[in-house]
C-alpha cells in the first residue's frame, strides 16, 4: 500500500493512527529513510493493572519523593527524550504524528521533574479505557520508573482496563508485564474500548 495513503505533510493522519490502535496495530519507523512499518505482535505485552508490582528498591526511592510528577506539560520534550538514543524507531514523522494526536487529546505524557528540569518520563495513547504505552526515557536514576508508577496509579483511579506495552522486556517484567496471545489481547482491547473514561 502506498506510503502517501498514510501520510500527509510529513505525518501519519490522526484518523489512520486511531483506527490502527483500535484494531490492535501501531507504527514504527523502520530505517533512516523514515519508512513506516505497522505491527501487531503475537504474543502481546501487557501490564495487568491489578497485578502491577513495584520492586522493593523503587518503593524505598518513592518514599523520598525524588521527583515532581506532571502530566502533559512537556509532551514534545518527552518525545524527543525517548528518541534520543543511538538507534530509535521514533523518526521525525513519528514525532509529528504523535504531536498531532496530543493536540487532539489522544496522546499523553507523564513527566518527572526536579528543579525545573525534565529528568525522565513516558508517553502513550489513550482511547476509551485502553492506554497504549509507547516509550519511556530517563536522564536520572529511577525517573522513568517513577513515571510508570504514576501512570498506573492514574489508570487505576480512572478505571482504565488495559495497559498495552506492545512487547515485554526484562525491565518491564519487574513490574508485572507479561505476554498474552493476540486473540486474548484483542478481546481485552475490545472490552476496554467500550469504557468511558478520561486520562486527564
Image (spheres, rainbow, N blue to C red):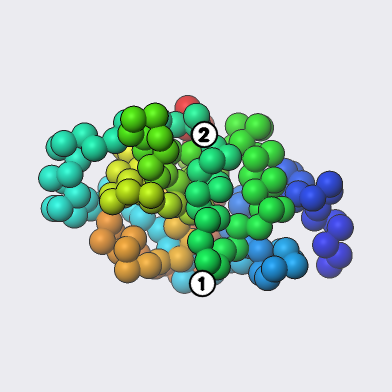
> Does residue 79 appear to the left or right of 44 in the view shown?
right
Helix, strand or loop at label 2? It is loop
Position of residue 31 in the picture relative to residue 137 (left or right) = right
Q: Quadrant of residue 71?
A: top left
Q: CA distance from mark 1 to mark 2?
A: 33 Å
Q: Residue at x 38, y 49 (%)?
A: 139
Return the residue at label 2: 74
Q: Who comes first in sequence, dot 1 or dot 2?
A: 1
For disc 1, the marked residue is 42
Q: SS class of the residue under badge 1?
A: loop
Query: Which residue is at a point 72% across and 63% down the rendered structure image?
Result: 34
The answer to whether residue 84 of the structure is visible from this angle is: yes
Left or right relative to 20: residue 55 = left
Q: Residue at x 28, y 59 (%)?
A: 176
Of circles 1 and 2, which is in front? Answer: 2
Check the picture and name the quadrant holding the N terminus. bottom right
| Label 1 Cα neighbours within 10 Å, binned few <14 / some 14-19 / many ≥20 | some
Towards the viewer: 98 or 67: 67
Give the number of marks: 2
Amino acid at each position: 500500500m502506498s506510503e502517501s495513503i498514510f501520510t500527509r505533510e510529513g505525518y501519519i493522519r490522526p484518523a489512520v493512527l486511531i483506527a490502527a490502535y483500535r484494531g490492535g496495530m501501531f507504527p514504527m519507523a523502520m530505517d533512516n529513510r523514515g519508512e513506516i512499518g505497522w505491527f501487531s505482535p503475537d504474543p502481546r505485552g501487557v501490564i495487568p493493572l491489578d497485578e502491577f508490582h513495584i520492586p522493593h528498591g523503587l518503593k524505598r526511592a518513592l518514599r523520598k519523593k525524588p521527583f515532581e510528577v506532571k502530566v502533559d506539560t512537556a509532551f514534545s520534550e518527552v518525545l524527543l527524550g525517548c528518541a534520543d538514543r543511538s538507534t530509535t524507531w521514533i523518526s521525525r514523522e513519528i514525532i509529528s504524528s504523535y504531536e498531532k494526536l496530543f493536540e487532539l487529546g489522544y496522546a499523553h505524557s507523564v513527566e518527572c521533574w526536579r528543579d525545573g528540569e525534565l529528568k525522565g518520563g513516558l508517553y502513550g495513547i489513550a482511547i476509551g479505557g485502553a492506554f497504549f504505552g509507547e516509550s519511556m526515557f530517563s536522564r536520572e536514576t529511577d525517573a522513568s520508573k517513577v513515571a510508570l508508577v504514576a501512570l498506573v496509579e492514574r489508570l487505576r483511579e480512572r478505571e482504565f482496563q488495559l495497559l498495552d506495552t506492545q512487547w515485554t522486556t526484562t525491565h518491564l517484567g519487574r513490574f508485572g508485564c507479561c505476554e498474552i496471545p493476540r486473540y486474548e489481547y484483542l478481546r481485552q482491547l475490545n472490552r476496554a474500548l467500550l469504557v468511558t473514561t478520561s486520562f486527564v
